[in-house]
Image (cartoon, grey):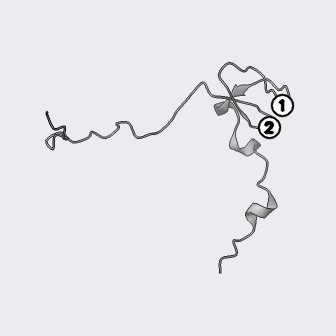
Amino acid sequence: MGIFAKDPSKEEQPGGSSGLHLDLDELICPDCRRALLPWQRSCPDDGATAVPRAAVSRTDLPPPPPHLLEPDDEG
C-alpha cells in the first residue's frame, strides 16, 4: 500500500484556490437586499425585480441599527 504525501519540491503557486467566491450572476432584491436563488427573477417577499449584486452600491444601504453602533460592554 502506498503512502500519499505532498511533494516538498512542488510549492503552491500564488493565485491558486484561496476560497474566494466570486459569482457575477448573483441576484439580490434591491429593496430588502435578500440574496435570491439563480432562477428567481423577483423577490418572493416584496415582488421587486431581481438585480445583480454589483448593481446595488453600498451607498444605497440603510444605516446600521443603533444598537450595533453602541460600544460593547466588556468587563
Q: Quadrant of the C terminus?
A: bottom right
Q: Residue 39 placed where, x, y %?
A: 68, 18
Outermost residue, right side: 46
| Residue lying furthest front | 1
Question: Residue at image x 64%, y 32%?
Answer: 54
x, y percent for residue 5: 18, 41
Disc 1 target residue: 45
Q: Secondary structure at mark 1?
A: loop
Q: CA distance from mark 2 to mark 1?
A: 9 Å
Q: Nearer the viewer, residue 56 or 67?
A: 67
> Neighbour class for label 1 at 10 Å: few (<14), some, many (≥20)?
few
- Where in the figure is residue 43, as x and y percent of width and height? 79, 27
- Identify which residue is drawn at 60% across, 24% down: 25
- Snapshot quadrant of residue 4: top left
| Residue depicted at 69% across the width and 71% down the height | 72
Image check: 40 left or right of 15? right
Q: Is residue 15 left or right of residue 74?
A: left
Where on the picture, by quarter, is residue 34? top right
How would you rate the neighbour count of disc 2 (Cα within 10 Å): few for under 14, some for 14-19, many for 20 or more?
A: few
Q: Amino acid at mark 1?
A: Asp
Asked if the residue at tag 1 contacts the one at tag 2, i.e. Cβ–Cβ closer than 8 Å, the answer is yes
Q: Quadrant of residue 61?
A: top right
Query: Label 2 sits on what residue type?
Result: Cys
Q: Secondary structure at mark 2?
A: loop
Residue 33 falls left or right of residue 14: right
Q: Nearer the viewer, residue 74 or 52?
A: 74
Q: Residue furthest bottom?
A: 75
Of the numbered discs 2 and 1, the one sitting upstream in the chain is: 2
Q: Residue at x 80, y 61 (%)?
A: 66
Q: Pointer 2: what residue?
A: 32
